[in-house]
């Protein structure tokens, strides 16, 4: 089995694969001080429920944007699973992408992994819209026919994430109530008639406006007019019905990319 790990700023997602089949998936909150033993205990609980054993895991691949947690996850793989993980971004792990940014090393591993998945599916040119800790837009262009890469990662946009924006607003204004964004009514009217409904409208329709505006500008870039827009991340399903430019939602995008990268690089 392959254990794929996606460590973001808010959550760590673990997915078990047998060949191309997803067997199980679970997540933990990203905590910088969590030791390797805690990851192992969580893994054993999941495996036990499926009558599997941790010794069935023969390979691991890891993408992380939190360096201090990367260290603990590598230790977890090496010391508890006796597996040296493949780490996206480390020397020797080939993505088959031409990263055309000012400093490729600064691009988040998850964003590159998503680009790999999109390129492998043939969905280029593409704009990947990821609703995570930040709301990110990533532009993937087709490579030249005679190129030795599958696609070009051309850059993107990083906007504040929906949850973090709500948290900042509530923290800064003493009389504003907290909001659970996941529970928003998809038919929410734009005109709020209470403080809470006005806040909900500002979050939902404000972000719809932000996303529509940025997608329009990105599609105006050379060669991007017909780009496929792919939504991913926890809130993609909430926002997608209100954004006509989103062509599809794929919440397995990062894990698909990790599985593809592992298969391309395994010995």
Image (cartoon, rainbow, N blue to C red):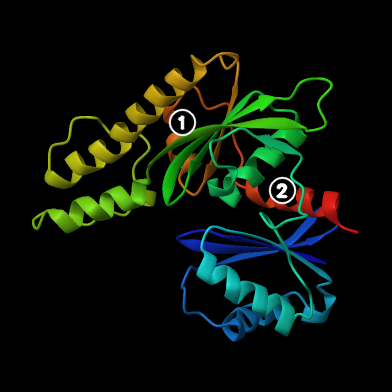
State left or right for residue 117 relative to residue 200.
right
Q: Nearer the viewer, residue 220 or 3?
A: 220
* Side (left or right) of 70 relative to 189: right
| Mark linked to residue 241 | 1
Q: Is residue 196 above or below residue 82?
A: above
Which residue is labeled 2 in the image?
256
Decide which of tag 1 and tag 2 comes sooner along the chain: 1
- Element type at marker 2? helix
Kindly report which numbered mark, 1 or 2, lies closer to the viewer in this rendering: 2
Residue furthest to the right: 267
In the picture as drawn, the residue positioned furthest to the front comes out as: 102
Q: Which residue corresponds to the image point at 72% horizontal and 33% vertical from the top-left? A: 119
In which quadrant is the C terminus drawn? bottom right
Q: Residue at x 32, y 54 (%)?
A: 180
Displayed quadrant of residue 51:
bottom right
Instruction: Give me the C-alpha separation between circle 1 and circle 2.
Output: 24 Å
* Mark 1 surroundings within 10 Å by alpha-carbon count, few (fewer than 14), some (14 through 19), many (20 or more): few
**Direction from residue 8 to residue 26 in the image, left or right:** right
Is the N terminus in the top left, top right, bottom left or bottom right quadrant? bottom right
């Amino acid at each position: 089995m392959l254990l794929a790990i996606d460590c973001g700023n808010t959550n760590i997602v673990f997915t078990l694969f047998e060949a191309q089949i997803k067997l199980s998936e679970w997540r933990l909150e990203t905590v910088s001080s969590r030791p390797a033993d805690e990851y192992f205990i969580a893994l054993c609980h999941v495996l036990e429920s499926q009558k599997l054993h941790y010794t069935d895991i023969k390979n691991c691949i890891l993408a992380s944007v939190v360096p201090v947690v990367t260290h603990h996850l590598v230790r977890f793989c090496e010391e508890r699973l006796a597996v040296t993980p493949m780490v996206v971004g480390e020397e020797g792990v080939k993505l088959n992408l031409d990263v055309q940014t000012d400093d490729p090393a600064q691009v988040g591993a998850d964003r590159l992994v998503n680009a790999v998945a999109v390129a492998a599916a043939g969905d280029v040119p593409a704009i990947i819209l990821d609703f995570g800790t930040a709301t990110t837009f990533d532009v993937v262009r087709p490579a030249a026919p005679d190129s030795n890469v599958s696609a070009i990662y051309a850059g993107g946009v990083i906007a504040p994430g929906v949850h973090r924006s709500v948290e900042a607003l509530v923290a800064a204004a003493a009389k504003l109530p907290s909001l659970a964004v996941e529970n928003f009514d998809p038919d929410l009217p734009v005109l709020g008639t209470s403080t809470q409904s006005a806040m909900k409208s500002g979050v939902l329709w404000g972000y719809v406006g932000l996303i529509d505006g940025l997608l329009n500008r990105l599609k105006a870039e050379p060669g991007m007019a017909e780009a496929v827009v792919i939504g991913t991340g926890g809130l993609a399903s909430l926002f997608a019905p209100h954004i006509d430019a989103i062509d599809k939602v794929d919440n397995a995008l990062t894990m698909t990319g990790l599985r593809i990268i592992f298969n391309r690089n395994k010995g």
